[in-house]
Structures are given as C-alpha cells and as structure tokens.
C-alpha cells in the first residue's frame, strides 16, 4: 500500500564523482518495501520543480527503519537533494511498483550498468538472505563509476566487472561475461535482473531460451505521480489481444520490473 | 464556530466543500493518504466511448513551474468503466463527477447514454480537449462545435452538465456563453495550455506527440484571468482550475468568482494537498471573520469599477 | 575554427548573431555591462505616436517562474523619441529595430511616417498588444484588424516590417498568414499571455490594471509551440520570443525554426544573459560539429512526419 | 554608473527575529555608492524566482570594500538569502537610484519605521562624517524590532524611539516626537529623510513650511530591473505641466528618494 510520509536524512555521502548515497529514516516504508520497488522523493520547496523524482531502493533495512538511495546527480532535482544533510526532512511517496519475486531456489544473475546497479543491491541482499546464489555483473565508463562493488561482493558468489576503457573485464559486454560464467560454472540460473542499459536488456532476450532463465528489466520512464494516477509513464508491452500487437503499461504501477521478452524495444 | 465550507455548486447539488481533483490527476485510493469522501467531489479521468490507448511515450516533461503532458485520453472505454470502476467510486460519501471525452458529438452522447442507467452520478463534465475527428480542431476552440456537442449531450440527460473549457482560444467568455446557450449547467476552466519542448541534445521534440498540455503553477495567472473573465460574462457557476497548489492559490480563484476549485498537477508532489487546502480555507475564513465560504466568492470583484 | 553565427534575418538584413532584446525589457547602456553593439540587433521599447503615460501602478508582480507586467506603453511619443533617443541608439554598431505601438491603424502609420526620414533604422516591429481604440479588442487577436494595420503600415515604408504576434489567440498560424498576406517581412512571437493575480490579504487584484502580461520561463513551452506552428505555416522568417533565459532555451527556438531570438524578462535578473547566450550558441555549434548557425535552424523538424 | 557584479558574503547575522544583517564584499559598488541608493540582489538559482530583489544600502564601507544590507525575511527570496552563509556568492546590480544630497551645514532628521531604518543608517553615517547634526527617530511594533539603535547613536546627537506597545516614547508618532525636539532644541534643521511608513511621510508635509526644512521620502515599489529599463516601478509625482496634474516617475531611477511634497499620496 502506497504511503505519503516524511523521512529524515540520517547521512548523505559522496560515493563517486556525481554519485551520492542517501540514508533515510522512514520505518513504515522500510517495513513495507520489496526489492525492485522505488519511491517518489521531494527534497525542495522550490516551485519551479513541480514533480517529485523516482528513485529505486538501493537498500531496504526494516530493522533499522531505514531505506537507502544511491543516485546520480543529473539535473536540478538531484542537485537539490545533494545539498540536504543529516537531520533534514524529505517527502516520500511509496513504496511504488511491483517489485520482484525471487525464485525459491537456485541462482540469479544481476547485470547493472552505471547507476543501474542501484536497484540490484536490494535484490542481491534479499536473494542472499533467502539462500540463493547471486552472480553480479557491473559495467561503467571507468573504474571509479563501478558502484557498490564491495557491498555486492558480500551478497554474491561472484562480482564480474567491465569498464569501457578496458581496465576491467577487457571492456567486454556484460552479457558476454554472463555467458562465460554460465558456460564455465553451470550455475542453476533461474532469473536474471538488469537495469541501466537498453542494449544489455535486449541482449538477454536470446539467452533466455538457450540457458533456461527468465530475464527481467527494471525500466525508467519520466514520472509525475509514481502511483498510477497520471498515466504518464507508459512503456510498450506486447499484447497479442490488440490489433497493434502491443498495449501501454504503466512503469510505475505495472513495473518497473518487466520480463525483457514482453517489452517492445 | 467553524466556518461553513459547503457550496451549492448547482441547484440541487450541494458540495461539502469547494475542493475537488482535476480530471486525470487523481485516482481514489491510489495512495493510502486520506478518505476521498473528504473531498467536495470526486472527478474521474475522462471516459471515452470505446477503449483508447492514449499517446506514444514519452508523455511527460517538466518545465519551469509546469508540467507538459501528452498522455492523451487512455481509457478502458465506458463499458469497462461502468462495470469495473464506477461501483467502487460510488462508495465514497461525496459527489461524483464523470468526465466524458469524445472525438465526435455523437461520441459524447454515447458515453452519457451508457451511464444514464447508473445511480450515484452527480454530474458529467465534458472534456473538449480532443481534436474533433471531422476537422482535427478541438471542440474546445471552436464555438459552433462546442455548442453542438453540449446541446447534443443536453438531450441525453437531465443530470447537470459541466463544460470544461480550453484556454487555447482568443475569447474564453465567448466559449462560456456558447456553453450556457447550449444548456450547460456550469463551466470548469482551464484545461491545459498547448505547449512543447525540444531536446537540445537529440534535436527533436521531447514528447512522443510533439505537443503537450501545460499545467501547474506556471499557468495559474492565465487560468485566474480566464476565470475572472468568465465569471463576469456568464450566469453559470464557474469551477476554477489551473496551477492551484496551496490555500492561497485556491482563495485567489474563489475571490475571483469561482464557486469551486479543482487541483491537478499539485496532487503529484503532495498527495495531501487537497485536504490541506480544505483546512486552509477554513482557517482563512475564521481568521478573517467570515462565517461561510459563500461570503468570499467573487469578493475581489467588488468595486471592480474602481480598479479597472 | 569558430562557427559562423551570422544570419540573414531578411533579404538585405544580415545580423552578426541571432540574439536581440525583446521590446521593453532592455535599455542600451542602462547598466555598464557590455557594448550593445555585440548584440545581433537592438530592439526599442514600443514607441507611441504621442506621449503616453502608461498604466497606474502597481505594474509588476512575480508569479511562479513568471512576471506579470501591466506597464502598458509609457512612451515619450515618436517626436521626442526621434530627437532624444534615436541619435544615441544609432551609434551602436548593430541593427536597430524600432518597435511601434498604436491604438488605431492610422497611429501605426503615423509613427512610421515620423521616422521615415531618419537613417539607421533596420526594421520596424509592430506591437499589436494595445487594445484598438475602436472596439477595445487588441489588433493582435483580430485577424482582420491585424491585416489592415500591417497593410496600412506597408504603404508607409519600404523598410522591413516585423509583425509581433500576440499568443492570446486560438490560431496563431492564421494570424501569421494574415501578416504575410498584408506584406509583413517577418513575424516575431510571442508577446505576453494575458494573466492576473489577486492579493488574498486585501482581496483585490494585485495590478493597478487588473490584467497584465505574463512573461518569463513559465510561458516558454507555449511560445515554443507557437513558433513551431508558425514556422511550419508561413514562408516568413520567424523570431522566437518567450521565456528564453539561457543558451539551451535559445537553441530550442532555433531548432524549432526561429531564425533569431529575443530575450526579455531574463535580462532583469542577469544583465549579461544575452552575451552569454551568444557565446553559448557558439560553443554548442562547435561541440556538435556545426560550422554555421543556419545549419541548426529548424533542425528539430527534420523527419517531423516520424514523430507526429 | 550601474554595474552587474558578484559579491561575496563576509558574514550574515540575525539581528532581530526575522531581521538579518548581510555583509558583502564588493569593492566597486562600495566605492561608487551614495547614501539612499540600493542594489538589486539575487542569491538563488531557482527558476521560480525570476526577479532580483531591491535592498537599500544600510552601510557603505568603501575602505573595507564592503556593503551591508539590513533586511526583513518576508517571502521566498528573502528566505533564500537568509540561507546563504559566509563565502557564498550573490549577484548584485547597482548602485541604483539617485541617492540623497546632504545640505552643506546644519542638522538633519531621520524618521524610520521598522525596516525603513535600513537606508537611514548610511545617511546618518555620511552626515556625521560631514559634520552635520543628526537627529534620529525610530519606531516599531515593539522594542526588539527597533533596528540599529546603537549604531544610530554613534552618528546622532539624539536617538528618539517609540513602540506601538507604548514601552518606548509612549507609543507616540515620530512626527510628534520630531516637533517636540524642534520646539525644545531648535536645531538648524535643513532636511528630513523618512522611510517605512506612508503615514509618517505624509505627516511631514505640513511641517516643512512651519519649520523651514525639506522632507524626503524613500519609496518602495515592486521592481523588475532596478535600472530604468522595464518602467514597472512607477509612483505618481505632481506635474503641473500635465492635464492630469501628475506624471509617473520611476522609483528605481528617478528616486527612490522623492520630496514628500511632490509625491501624489
Ligand atoms: C523507477 C525509476 C527508478 C529510478 N531509480 C534511480 C536510482 O536509483 N538512482 C538514480 O540516480 N536515478 C534513478 N532514476 C532516475 C532519476 O529519477 C532521475 O535521474 C531524476 O529524476 C533526475 O532528476 P533531476 O531533477 O536531477 O534531473 P532533470 O533533468 O532536471 O529532470 C527533469 C525531469 O526529468 C525527469 N527525469 C530525468 N531523468 C530521468 C530518468 N532517467 N528517468 C525518469 N525521469 C527522469 C525528472 O524526474 C524530471 O521530471 C530512476 C528513475 C525511475 C523511473
Ligand atoms: C528601493 C527599495 C529598497 C528596499 N530596501 C529594503 C531593505 O533595505 N531591507 C528590506 O528588508 N527590504 C527592502 N526593500 C523591500 C524588499 O525588496 C522586499 O522585502 C523583498 O523584495 C521581498 O522579497 P521576497 O521574495 O522575500 O518576498 P515575496 O513576497 O516573495 O516577493 C514577491 C515579489 O514582490 C516583491 N516585493 C515584495 N515586497 C516588496 C516591497 N516591500 N517592495 C518592493 N518589492 C517587494 C519582490 O521583489 C518580489 O518580486 C526595498 C524595496 C525597494 C523597492
Ligand atoms: C497528467 C494529466 C492528465 C490529465 N488528464 C485529463 C483528462 O483526462 N481530462 C481532462 O479534462 N483534463 C485532464 N487534465 C487537465 C487537468 O484536469 C487540468 O485541467 C489541468 O492540468 C490544469 O490544472 P493543474 O494546473 O492544477 O494541473 C490532465 C492533466 C494532467 C497533468
Ligand atoms: C516589463 C515588460 C515590458 C514590455 N514592453 C513591451 C513593449 O513595449 N512592446 C512589446 O512589443 N513587448 C513588450 N514586452 C513583451 C516582451 O517584449 C516579450 O514579448 C515578452 O516579455 C516575452 O518574452 P520574455 O518571456 O523573454 O520576457 C514587455 C515585457 C515586459 C516583461
Ligand atoms: S507516473 Fe503517473 S501513472 Fe506512472
Ligand atoms: S524597476 Fe525597472 S524601471 Fe524601475
């Protein structure tokens, strides 16, 4: 059930150039949230920024009553967020979206590009907690932008990285690196989750049948409400019942997690 | 003693307070925030005669103090609306206004026909923002088309008809007068101003539909001016919409002559904004010695002659 | 190599760059900030046929992302303008555009007559925002009046005539076509959107004139949409105005098809905004591999069919 | 000559509830400014606040290269200003307005209500520097809102105060208190400057002839440019040459100082 609540900033720290980690005290949301869900956040009184901004839950800590957000400073909203410090309040709507459903047993793989790593951390932690094997694949432009590597290592059997400059993983595609691991280690891979790159998500489509997993992508769309009310955040999803062959689904309510094979790319 | 917030919006339709959502910006119970029964009325997203998919994404873009939306009117169609949505909406203890969309005069009539057998509908609000299938010009900007569509809808129902006006016109008072002549019970204004944005990096329009409707605080001065003009031009109740984000904004519209107000874009950032405005209006009345809200409706027009 | 910023605004009128002030928002040398000769052109405050006092105060009110002004057209009158102001404006090494205001068709013609003997005027810009003395409707919202006034002005001068369009109309493309038919050399749009504000404490309109014109970032989406529409509808150069506050805003208008842009309200908070935009456009061109500004004019329209 | 410059905040301190004193390093403006002039100030990137805000120069310190602004937190712009601290930059346009011209000899009186005291301090300091006698009269709702009393005392032969609650000056009108002093001490009063109350300014009109001084008022009007370009900040000034009997003058350029007798109230 969606809530509209104040949260208090516990800490905010810079984790990489232009990337911040925000820790927020908000017990009700921490208790209700599932991995893959997100919140709408507002941290300003400025009337020029009329919309709250969507952010995935990077970590969900029900016992501490906290949620964490890993974000990239992109425009005016995130710049304002970055100015807030411990003790200040933010406004939150959430938890939004359907979140993910983990398989009962076996292994999962997480493929994140850049800030796309953010929602994967919560999934990694939950999967590990449930006794699943986690394989994490991270890519970015350069090493300093590989986010959360150490934390992922705690929850993963393996963390494989790749940077565009070739310093990590020879700059190879994460899907290729995934195939390597599958071929070498034959994990019992049930689900793959990806975020941060359309190319990565599309690259998973042909691999599903070959390796017997189902791949999901966490989509982004510009959002106004985050609660299903405005109908603004749609993506095209295959729909054989329609003459066009697709229908629009709301990323905020019907997603943000979608099977890669159902999205019209 | 607490001030009386109730208004008789239309003969026989008394609202417990003058605050309601703007069509398409509020879903009952979508956030667990308050009971929608507290509102003066519930207004639905516009209902189309048949299922409509809406526009291609991207559908949203934020501008300075505003929101461009090119959602279009995605709709499950009136039959699905009647079977699946209406029963839950009727549960709330407040007035229920059904927003109606169409691409032809007949389509408006068809939606109303499909709902006439249903109980619990307080009024229809006709949304004329869609281009007319015939000539592509929105009903809302062509006085003759508007007249015809309202007159046709009037034949279908005895229920109150609220005509929602588009601001993209030269003479909003003329449009309101046409609505009145055609039998409208009230007018609501404004719908969104047509706008657009260009992505300078990709060098193409941001919105899938190129054009979108501008809403939010940016448009409030235009909305208020049009409400002022229309309240002075027709003998119908006026519902003010456009950029209302707090109590002070709402009061401006009431003082300009609106008998009720709708809140749209502001719901997104602050899901509690409508109950906050209801309380805020009550406080304003009490602090300023008014016993009832009707005392302030149109009050800024008193002595209008003096200040131009 | 530095990109070529010059544009041929009109046949025979080449500007060193496409950036100029919007009428009424910039006074040459009023702040000792830069040489106005750097600008693509100088545009004057509208000049009236005889001295006009302007509206009663208060004349200004800030809104979210916008400015409401009810300045009116205070003017020293064309004779005093010619004797006292024009000589200093002519000194600057750039194009000079004289904005002309009137309340009747004849008044526009009178202002032009009074200036025809003067050297150093590159073009006239006709400001149609004043209500016509005859029926009170601004020229800018009545296509027939607009046509007459432009045609009449056309008789008075061989100099280029820029027609500045009001956004308070149903069909801006129609207005632009009327201007073209009547002999306009170019169109500039938009002037301000009519709006108002109410003082909730005093319960009366804020502005002395009740209504004012809304400008600033709030109106940019509407201005850009209208520029897009008009650039697709007429065969005239288009000058884009409305809410431009930085390089990115200016580029949006150029990409939409404007051959030059005007900056108004943004001058108040940042007197350096125009030179900054000129430099910003140059950087954008260089970073994106364009050698001249004309390469990007209208570029967002390419493949227009594809995206609606 | 008007300039557009950055200024750096040296200090900002709260001097009374809702009243702050801002000290800004800006040598060029400090050097050029005259008492009675003001600056347009912007201290935000928010695009909802489109206009800079006008503030009188409370103190002009050319040797230190500083200007000081005493301001009341009223709306969103002044609230943003109050959030800025030492080392942060503000944007300034100025010095604006005509400023005042002090008499060569004799005495002047300053009558300020509330924040209207702000521009009077710069006048007091200049007058004292020129060897003139200064009589200062301050009023406010209550004692804590009497601003700059101690500083005024340094430049004034006398500081007379009055508060609406009667705790000071019996709550009497400053014009009455001025008359008392004139009657008792017969200063050679040449000029009177007032700011912060229309009633005070109007009250000075009949006193001018009786006591042989000229009174000036520092007016406020909403401003956009502060430089004479927008023509938005006008007040009505008597003008026998016009059929209406008045014409509009720009507060920012033709004022903000006007003879009280010339303003149409
Ligand atoms: C479901 C979801 C989860 C997300 N999770 C994260 C996260 O965990 N960490 C993170 O750094 N970012 C995340 N994003 C992207 C984040 O919402 C944007 O970076 C942010 O809104 C940018 O705001 P701004 O004001 O700084 O940028 P501006 O460019 O000023 O934004 C202007 C407008 O564009 C919208 N916008 C801009 N970029 C995006 C985007 N990529 N997706 C959606 N809307 C956008 C903003 O919401 C705003 O309405 C997520 C987006 C979605 C939809
Ligand atoms: C020449 C001059 C000198 C001034 N000197 C001082 C001073 O030394 N100290 C001080 O505290 N204040 C002074 N003021 C008033 C000060 O400019 C306003 O208090 C301030 O602009 C309020 O801004 P805001 O955003 O906090 O208020 P808001 O209410 O949010 O302002 C909204 C709009 O109204 C304008 N505005 C609001 N109040 C006034 C006002 N009284 N006068 C003019 N415009 C106003 C703002 O500039 C803005 O455009 C002066 C005004 C003028 C014209
Ligand atoms: C996302 C969105 C969807 C909307 N959908 C509808 C609609 O279906 N029918 C309608 O009449 N108006 C619709 N509107 C317009 C609003 O009802 C309202 O008239 C407009 O947004 C101005 O009010 P605001 O500034 O408070 O948002 C929509 C507006 C938005 C932002
Ligand atoms: C204070 C002020 C005065 C203006 N005076 C005139 C004028 O004299 N003539 C005119 O054609 N437009 C006038 N305008 C309109 C502007 O030229 C411009 O069209 C409008 O402000 C939109 O641009 P902007 O958003 O960049 O300000 C004025 C605008 C403002 C804010
Ligand atoms: S963001 Fe409003 S429906 Fe998804
Ligand atoms: S504020 Fe612009 S002319 Fe005075």
Image: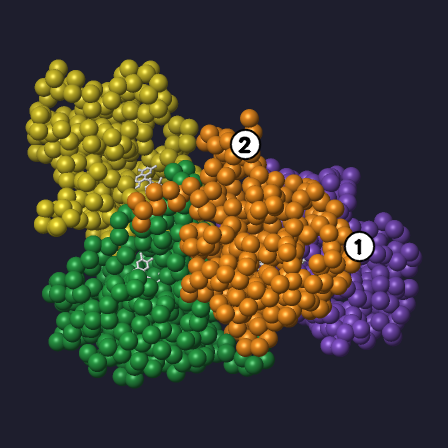
Chain colours: A yellow, B green, C orange, D purple
Point out the quarter of the image occupied by ligand 3. bottom left
Q: Quadrant of the C terminus of chain A?
A: top left
| Count of numbered circles on the image | 2
Q: Are marks 1 and 2 on the same chain?
A: no
Q: Is residue B111 left or right of residue D122?
A: left
Subunit that carries the residue with mark 1:
D
Q: Secondary structure at mark 2?
A: loop
Q: Tell me which residue sits at (54%, 79%) in the image.
A: B304
Residue D205 vertical position relative to residue A74 in the rendered view, above or below: below
Mark 2 lies on residue: C3
Q: Is residue D8 left or right of residue C286?
A: right
The answer to whether the beta carbon of the residue marked 1 is less than 8 Å from any atom of ligand 2 is no
Q: Look at the image and tell me whether residue D13 can be seen.
A: no
Q: Is residue D168 left or right of residue C189?
A: right
Residue C282 vertical position relative to residue B210 in the rendered view, above or below: above
Q: Tell me which residue sits at (56%, 29%) in the image.
A: C2
Mark 1 lies on residue: D124
């Amino acid at each position: 059930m969606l809530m509209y609540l104040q949260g208090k900033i516990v800490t905010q720290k810079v984790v990489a150039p232009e990337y911040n980690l925000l820790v927020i005290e908000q017990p009700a949301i921490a208790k209700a949230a599932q991995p893959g869900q997100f919140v709408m956040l507002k941290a300003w009184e400025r009337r020029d920024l009329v919309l709250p901004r969507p952010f995935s839950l990077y970590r969900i800590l029900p016992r501490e009553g906290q949620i964490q957000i890993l974000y990239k400073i992109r425009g005016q909203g995130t710049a304002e967020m970055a100015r807030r410090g411990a003790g200040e309040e933010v406004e939150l709507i959430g938890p939004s979206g359907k979140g993910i459903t983990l398989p009962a047993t076996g292994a999962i793989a997480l493929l994140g590009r850049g800030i796309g790593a953010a929602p994967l951390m919560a999934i990694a932690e939950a999967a590990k907690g449930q006794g699943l094997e986690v394989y994490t694949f991270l890519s970015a432009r350069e090493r300093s932008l590989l986010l959360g590597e150490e934390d992922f290592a705690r929850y993963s059997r393996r963390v494989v990285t790749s940077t565009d400059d070739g310093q990590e993983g020879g700059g190879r595609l994460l899907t290729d690196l995934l195939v390597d691991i599958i071929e070498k280690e034959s994990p019992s891979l049930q689900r793959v989750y990806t975020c941060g790159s359309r190319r990565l998500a599309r690259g998973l489509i042909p691999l599903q049948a070959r390796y017997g997993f189902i791949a999901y992508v966490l989509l982004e769309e510009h959002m106004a409400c985050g609660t299903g009310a405005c109908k603004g955040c749609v993506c095209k999803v295959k729909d054989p019942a329609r003459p066009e062959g697709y229908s629009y689904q709301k990323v905020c309510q019907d997603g943000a997690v979608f099977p890669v094979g159902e999205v019209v790319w | 003693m607490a001030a009386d917030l109730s208004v008789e919006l239309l003969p026989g339709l008394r609202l417990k307070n003058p605050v309601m959502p703007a069509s398409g910006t509020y879903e009952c119970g979508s956030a667990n925030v308050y009971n929608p029964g507290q509102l003066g009325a519930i207004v639905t997203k516009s209902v189309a005669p048949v299922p409509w998919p809406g526009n291609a994404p991207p559908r949203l873009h934020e501008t300075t103090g505003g929101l461009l939306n090119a959602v279009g009117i995605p709709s499950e169609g009136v039959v699905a609306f009647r079977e699946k949505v209406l029963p839950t909406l009727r549960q709330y203890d407040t007035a229920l206004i059904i927003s109606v969309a169409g691409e032809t005069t007949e389509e408006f009539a068809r939606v109303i026909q499909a709902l006439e057998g249903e109980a619990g509908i307080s009024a229809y609000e006709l949304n004329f923002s869609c281009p007319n299938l015939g000539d592509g010009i929105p009903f809302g900007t062509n006085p003759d088309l508007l007249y015809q569509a309202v007159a046709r809808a009037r034949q279908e129902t005895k229920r109150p008809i609220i005509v929602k006006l588009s601001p993209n016109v030269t003479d909003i008072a003329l449009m309101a007068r046409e609505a009145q002549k055609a039998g409208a019970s009230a007018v609501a204004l404004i719908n969104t101003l047509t706008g657009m944005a260009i992505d300078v990096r990709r060098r193409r329009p941001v919105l899938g539909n190129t054009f979108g409707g501008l809403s939010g605080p940016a448009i409030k001065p235009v909305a208020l001016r049009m409400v002022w003009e229309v309240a002075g031009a027709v003998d119908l109740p006026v519902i003010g919409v456009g950029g209302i984000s707090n109590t002070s904004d709402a009061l401006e519209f009431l003082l300009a002559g609106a008998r009720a107000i709708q809140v749209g874009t502001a719901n997104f950032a602050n899901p509690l904004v409508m109950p906050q405005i209801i309380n805020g209006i009550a406080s304003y009345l009490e602090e300023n010695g008014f016993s009832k809200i009707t005392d302030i409706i149109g009050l800024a027009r008193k002595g209008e002659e003096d200040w131009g």
